[in-house]
Amino acid sequence: MPTRLRSALHVETLEDRDLPAGNVNVFITGGVLTIQGDNDANRIRITQPAAFNLLVSPGDTSTTINGGLGAVSLITGGVNRVVVDLKGGDDVLEISPGGGIVVFNAPVFINTGSGSDSVLIEDIVAHNHFTIDTGNQGDQVILRSPSRPLQFNRDLTILTGQGPDVLTALNVVLRGSLRFATAQQNDQVRLQNVVVGGEFNANLGSGADFLALNQTEVRGQAFVGGDAGNDQIIIARGQFDFSLRIATSQAPGFFASDNDFVNVHNTYVAGDVIISTGKGADFVRLRYNFFGAQTFVHLGEDNDSLEFVATDFELGMVAHGGLGIDTFVDLGSNTGLVQLESFP
Ligand SMILES: [Ca+2]
Ligand SMILES: [Ca+2]
């Protein structure tokens, strides 16, 4: 490693930094690989120069690792757990930035704590469970691959806590389940080219949330929950081998009326499709889909709209407008028995 170069850069840029970057301790005890930051803004990178060898490097010119400015090399052969705990501060964790595989055989627990944190993963094979918890404040989690898909062989869990969070997953293959929860405030989630071998569970929490699933395949049950706030759920070119359930309503929906938008198009669902949008003026649009079992749309209180076109409701669709003046727009080319109910 070019330790001298890093030192030289450090001397040049240290004066320009307003925020201290702190120190990260890296050590292995009892088979647990621990990467532990402090309450400053820690920036680190994890790369894999060789098999069973991880390198933890400073991600900027002033974060120190084990008190020094150089990288720390670890032999990971006997590691049975990986714990990354970056504590407070606006932390940045990059795993394989720019590509170059990083393999984790042990389960991985990442916690970036409070502060506006960033987690970027660009190339990985995780053979065991993988958990990312970015704590409170507005955090960013980006999983994207410049080359082969990111590979998770067990469950992937992502918790972004309070604050306006952004989660992006592009080109990811999971053998296990994908669960994420973005908690309070307005969150944005975008998934593209993601294959989930197990269950899919997206909990957007309260706030005006945005979720786009583009070309996402799910082998198990899929659930999207929106809670309070005006949510937008867009599912395009998806394939769901089991059921798809979308619930954007606040529970219990006594006070707040959240106006939700659900758009499912060019999507195949083998099992039941259940969409409930709760109170508020909601809009559900279904276009060019194949729904292989029963479809239920519950629009809840207030004046809602349901528009559907070129969708195959194999075992029929039942749509309830709930209270309010509801609009059902059948644009044609649908198949299957459709039953539309409203209670103005
Ligand atoms: Ca920190
Ligand atoms: Ca955070």
Image: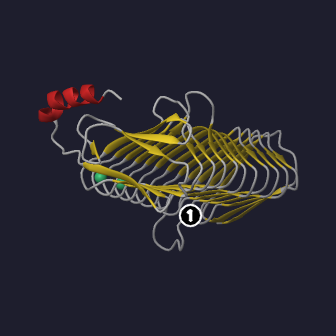
The one nearer the camera, 145 or 266, is: 145
Q: Return the x and y of residue 301 as percentages of the image width and height.
A: 59, 66
Identity, as a three-letter code, of the amino acid under mark 1:
Ser
The one nearer the camera, 343 or 21, is: 21
Q: Is residue 238 left or right of residue 122?
A: right
**Which quadrant of the rendered structure holds the N terminus?**
top left
Is disc 1's CB within 8 Å of ligand 2? no
**Residue most extreme to the left:** 15
Q: Return the x and y of residue 130 as percentages of the image width and height.
A: 56, 54
**Which quadrant of the rendered structure holds the C terminus?**
bottom right
Say what secondary structure mark 1 lies in: loop
The one nearer the camera, 231 or 20, is: 20
Query: Does residue 322 sit above or below 10 in this rendering?
Result: below
Q: Which residue is mark 1?
A: 249
Q: Residue at x 45, y 33 (%)?
A: 97
Total number of numbered labels?
Answer: 1
Could you say which quadrant of the image residue 318 lies in? bottom right
Q: Residues within 10 Å of mark 1 (few under 14, many from 20)?
A: many
